[in-house]
Amino acid sequence: MRKWLIQFLCMISSALGAGDLWDLAPIHYSDAMPSDAVAMLAADLASGKKALAGSTDLERLKFVLNELDVPQESQVLVYSKTSHQNPLIRPSDPRALYFSMNTYVGYVPGGDIEVIVQDRVLGPVFYLIKTVKRGGLEIERDLTTCLSCHGTTATLNVPGMQVRSVIPDEDGHPLLAMGTSQVDYRTAMAERWGGYYVTGRASMPHLGNRVYQNGAVVDAQASNLTDLNGIIDMSRYPRATSDVVALMVLEHQCRMHNLLTAASMRYRRAFYLGRAADAQANPDDGAAGRVADGSAEEIVDCLFFKDEANPGEDTEGGAAFQQAFAKALPTAADGRSLADFQLYQKLFKYRCSYMVYSNAFKDLPPRVARAVKQRMKSALAGESPAVNWLKASERRKISTILAETLPDW
């Protein structure tokens, strides 16, 4: 199925003219007007319906996070120069990242605020928020700078997110000859977090919290750093942490989000081409349906954490992130939730991604959503070997949580 899907995607990316998949019909990503949370915030600020709170960079960041419902507790700090704001980033001045299920915010003191937000039609949309001389915010949609990194094979050839682990020197420059990795929940801990600060207990060796000299031995190490006070000036950031659990959640979420976006865009393009080729035929009976089914297989594998890397026997993050994370997710009648962490050999107690509650999941085309849910239900019922890494008891608990908390399940 997947080999056929790759071949078909190569065909549809070039059919009816060259160009990025997202800019071809019927999506027209660059030309379409978004209606996401940032677009609405910009309109409210311009009309005077809302007023900017705060005069400092930090106060404006907190205003944006609050307006977009992104928890400050999700903060992780990256000091590698792997952003378009590289001149401002170094180990003493890291870039902060914040996230919810639907929104990602980047911040460097003295620089712009970067936002990626889910739009119902367009998927992830990229913005730069700048402070202007009169003390307000200038919100601009970005269609060039961000997509040079966030619209590549690393993001499944759709606008999306990526997490990189690099070997940084003392100024934060990646020593690319010494290696770099695209990271998600399947990546071994020993390859993660190069160029990131990591607070909390990480019993498995990793690459975070250090800089290197060119040609030096790259040796992963465990860490137990409570906070970053005394290491960098934390008064410029909302929190003094770069939480290990938040990092692991973000790495899973970025891959999950990209898979959902890719499924939506690929299916919509395939359906459009099928209808253009034969207006009387139902594209779901042909290529579009096969694209939906192939995408569902990839999505369900990620939803159920297939090939998840072992986070170790004794991982411990701060309570603040875990509490903020759980607060955003529903619970079943018995109190169980997809937000329940295990942090012992696996990240979550119940290995079904909380991203089923995200806007990206809700925004899936109906044919794709049906394929995903049918495959999930079949796997959880034990009718297929698709999730043989989950024990029957875990599958039953996941089924109950979904039945009680996921609309249209």
Image (spheres, rainbow, N blue to C red):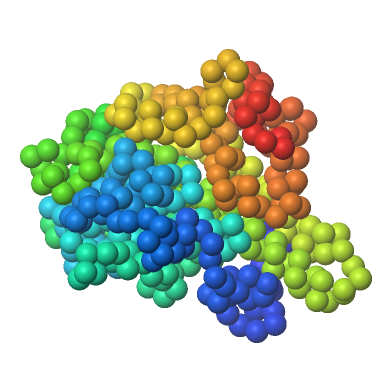
On the image, the x and y values in percent for residue 123 come to 55, 59
Picture quadrant where residue 115 is located: bottom left
On the picture, is 194 further left or further right than 304?
left
On the picture, is 323 further left or further right than 335?
left
Which image quarter holds the C terminus? top right
Q: Is residue 97 above or below residue 205?
A: below
Res. 358 in view: yes
Q: Is residue 247 above or below residue 34?
A: above
Res. 7 in view: no
On the image, the x and y values in percent for residue 296 come to 68, 49
Which image quarter holds the N terminus? bottom right
On the image, the x and y values in percent for residue 182 come to 41, 55
Picture quadrant where residue 401 is located: top right
Q: Is residue 1 above or below residue 223?
A: below
Q: Residue at x 19, y 56 (%)?
A: 55
Instruction: Return the residue nearer the eye: 212 or 172.
Output: 172
On the picture, is 239 further left or further right than 351?
left
- Outermost left residue: 230
Q: Residue at x 59, y 57 (%)?
A: 120
Instruction: Return the residue nearer the eye: 361 or 301.
Output: 361
